[in-house]
C-alpha cells in the first residue's frame, strides 16, 4: 500500500502541468472535449502505458474558471488500471489544482473499506502566464497522513528548484512544438527514507505539456512521457 500511494503522489505532481484555461492561460487550451494522450516509457524507451485526459466540463464561478478533467491510465498490456476525474481552478493569470481531488475515487473507496483514514494537505503547483528564461517558479508540496488500526504513516512529496531554463523546439508523435524547458527537483520522504529525482518539463503555448523526463540524482534517465495525440 505504501508503495502504491507514494508512486501515485510522485505521478500527480506532473498532472497540474497539463491543464489550464484559455481566458486565463496562454499555454493551454481549455475547451470541453479537448483530449490529450501521453505515452509513458522507461529508461530504455519501452512503453509502460498510456495516460489519456479529456476536458469534460468547464464552468465559471465568479472570477474563477473551474474545469473537470477526466483521466484514464492504461498499462502496456492494454489493461485499464484506473480512471478518475479532478477539478482545476484558473483565476487571474495563474492555474492551480486541489491535490485531494487527484486521488482516484476507487482508490480512496478501497482504502476506506479497509479502515484506512487519510488526510491530504499540500501547496498547489502554480504556473503563471508570463514565463521567461531564467525565471524561478514557486515550490509545491503534498503530504499524506495515514492511520489504519493505530498504525500511522506519513508521506511527504516536495517539488523545489523549479526554474525556466530555456526555449527550444521539441518533436513528438503529435508534432513539432516551440517550448519552454522547466527543470525541477522532486523529493519524497516516507518512514524515514528519502528519495530524490530531477525532471525536465517541456511546455508549449496553446498545448501544455509536450514532454517530460525524470532522472536519478546521478543524471541517469529513469522515465519519459511524451504527448502522442492532441485534439480540440
Image (tube, helix red, strand yellow):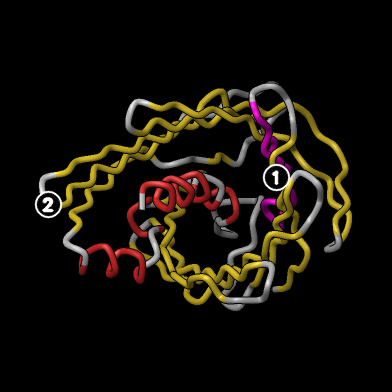
Q: Let me know if residue 138 appears in the view.
A: no
Residues at marks 1 and 2, CA–CA distance in whole angstroms: 36 Å
Position of 188 with respect to 35 (left or right) is left
Q: Please say if 154 is above or below 175.
A: above
Q: Residues within 10 Å of mark 1 (few under 14, many from 20)?
A: many
Q: Secondary structure at mark 1?
A: strand
Give the foreground label among 1 and 2: 2
Q: Point out residue 76 in the picture as x, y percentages from the top left corner.
A: 69, 67
Q: Point out residue 84 in the picture as x, y percentages from the top left corner.
A: 44, 70
Q: Point out residue 35 in the picture as x, y percentages from the top left corner.
A: 65, 72
Helix, strand or loop: magenta stretch: strand
Residue at 85% across, 56% down = 172
Q: Point out residue 111 in the picture as x, y percentages from the top left corner.
A: 26, 62
The stretch of residues the image draws in magenta is: 200-216
Residue at 51% across, 26% down = 160
Nearest the eye: 132 or 145: 145
Q: Quadrant of the C terminus?
A: bottom right
Nearest the eye: 188 or 55: 188
Residue at 41% across, 42% down = 124
For mark 2, what is the residue? Answer: 149
For mark 1, what is the residue? Answer: 223
Asked which quadrant contains residue 166, the reply is: top right
Amino acid at each position: 500500500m505504501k508503495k502504491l500511494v507514494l508512486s501515485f503522489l510522485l505521478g500527480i505532481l506532473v498532472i497540474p502541468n497539463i491543464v489550464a484555461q484559455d481566458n486565463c492561460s496562454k499555454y493551454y487550451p481549455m475547451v470541453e472535449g479537448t483530449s490529450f494522450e501521453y505515452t509513458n516509457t522507461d529508461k530504455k524507451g519501452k512503453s509502460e502505458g498510456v495516460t489519456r485526459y479529456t476536458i469534460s466540463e468547464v464552468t465559471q464561478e465568479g472570477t474563477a474558471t473551474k474545469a473537470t478533467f477526466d483521466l484514464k491510465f492504461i498499462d502496456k498490456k492494454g489493461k485499464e488500471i484506473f480512471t478518475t476525474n479532478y477539478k482545476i481552478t484558473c483565476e487571474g493569470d495563474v492555474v492551480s489544482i486541489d491535490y485531494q481531488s487527484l486521488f482516484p475515487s476507487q482508490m480512496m473507496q478501497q482504502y476506506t473499506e479497509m479502515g484506512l483514514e487519510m488526510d491530504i494537505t499540500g501547496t498547489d503547483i502554480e504556473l503563471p502566464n508570463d514565463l521567461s528564461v531564467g525565471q524561478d517558479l514557486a515550490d509545491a508540496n503534498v503530504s499524506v497522513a495515514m492511520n489504519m488500526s493505530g498504525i500511522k504513516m506519513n508521506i511527504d512529496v516536495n517539488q523545489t528548484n523549479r526554474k525556466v531554463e530555456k526555449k527550444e523546439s521539441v518533436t513528438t508523435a503529435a508534432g513539432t512544438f516551440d517550448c519552454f524547458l522547466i527543470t525541477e527537483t522532486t523529493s519524497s520522504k516516507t518512514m524515514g527514507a528519502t528519495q530524490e529525482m530531477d525532471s525536465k518539463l517541456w511546455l508549449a503555448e496553446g498545448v501544455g505539456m509536450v514532454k517530460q523526463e525524470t532522472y536519478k540524482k546521478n543524471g541517469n534517465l529513469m522515465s519519459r512521457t511524451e504527448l502522442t495525440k492532441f485534439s480540440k
